[in-house]
Image (cartoon, rainbow, N blue to C red):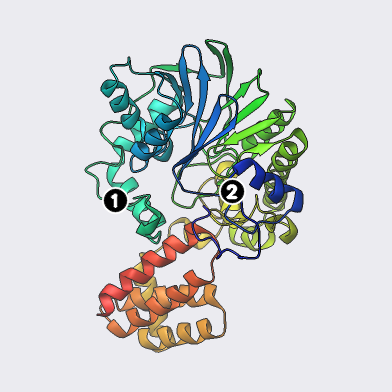
Amino acid sequence: MGLHPKPRDLNKVFTDNPLELSTRVIDECAATEPTNRVTNKLSELTDGIAMVESFSHMIAFKTEEGLVLFDASGKQSGVAVVDSLRKWDTSRVHSLAYTHGHLDHVGGSGAIVADAEKRNFVPPTVFGHENVPKRLARYKDTDGWNTIINQRQFGGVSPKHGMGLTGQSPSFVPDDTVWPDVVYQDEMKLSVGDLDIQFNHGKGETDDHTWAWIPQSRTLITGDLVLWVFPNAGNPQKVQRYPLEWAQALREMMTYNAELLLPAHGLPIEGTERINRVLGDLAHVLETLVADTIELMNGGYQLNDILHMVKVSPDMLELPWLQPLYDEPEFVVRNIWRMYGGWWDADPASLKPSPRGDLAEELALLSGGANQMAERAEKLAEEGNLRLACHLVEFAATADPKSKTIHGIRAEIYRLRRSQESSLMSKGIYAAAMRESEGLAE
């Protein structure tokens, strides 16, 4: 998210103040600098409220009983985030609330506990939805699988960003990750000193998501329900997402007429009109995708048809808070199908398919050989038909998996495919295929 910013225009005036930046971006509907910033720097947004901008942010509130934190950032950024926090305030961390159980939000919790031990403080009480520990348990059960898909999804992210997203670790869940001490089901209220917090459960990117309302400052804590990119409701390698429930949570937030919105990724937003503009736009695209997909499902269309028929308005995708830089609408359609229609795509041949190798060998035989199929794929790629080219080169490589020539063509096709994609998810998967064939073509 925001990992490939465009070079700065030196004729423009830039600001490090995240509220000033978001105000300009929303008012002008245009961004000239990154809206997702990974700096590990703290900004005090208003008296007693701060944000540390990292791959996943930490939100901090001062109270007379100590600090209340939302999210701990990730394992690789945890220490830097805590260091920035401590330059702002050295009080005890009284409470830590997880917006959800993704590791870039909970993995840095070990650094918070280590800091408490160093300062002889009692460790914070950790809060989260009841599905957070279930998520962490599932991660442990699927440790190898999650490590593989994380490396594939983030394998193309340059190490210079300092996020260590694919660093070698003995386990997917860091050993020092702190599990919640207190969990809730639908909603919960908490008071720490003079700070009142209302926790609300809302499904979206995850089934364990918490968004919070702080009445004194009229502040929304949104976690990953606001990302400053197109909603991550379709990730092709992860479990079910909940686009309609996500939109419903956003609509509920709009009823609070908040004056400050603090997301876990991207920029904070100030002002009720701006906040509700962004929340409304996010809800609208998700609601429209669900409605359009279900309408076509009711009409008897196959998944492949629907993927090419359902679109989001290009004008919406150009908005700085809706650009498909991480996830993209086509993937969300697949998740909608999976939720309402199951795993079968309605193609009779795919219900009980032949082994992929058998199909590839038969197609290669019909087309005059695997090399000829690969050459045709190369020609299609040159003509710009990358979707069809990828199908053919996959069949060719499967039919003749030891051919260095075919793998050389496959690597170049996926190199080109990656260069023309906008979302990090597509780029990561195509880069992984490219690297695989590069290794086999040597």
Rendered view: 268 above or below 159:
above
Find residue 106 and report its image quarter. top left
Q: Position of residue 305 (x, y in %)?
A: 64, 62
Q: Confirm whether residue 369 shows in the render.
A: no
**Residue type for callout 2:** Trp
Residue 167's label in the rendered image is 1
* Disc 2 target residue: 337
Mark sitting earlier along the chain (2/1): 1
Q: Within the image, what quadrant is residue 127 found in?
A: top left
Of residues 296 and 83, the one nearer the viewer is 83
Q: Position of residue 304 (x, y in %)?
A: 59, 61
Residue ID at (40%, 37%): 81
Asked if residue 1 lies left or right of residue 83, the reply is right
- Image spot of residue 83 (x, y percent): 37, 35
Q: Residue at x 41, y 83 (%)?
A: 374
Q: Quadrant of the C terminus?
A: bottom left
Label 1 neighbour load within 10 Å: few <14, some 14-19, many 20+ = few
Q: Position of residue 433 (x, y in %)?
A: 37, 68
Residue 241, quarter of the rendered image = top right
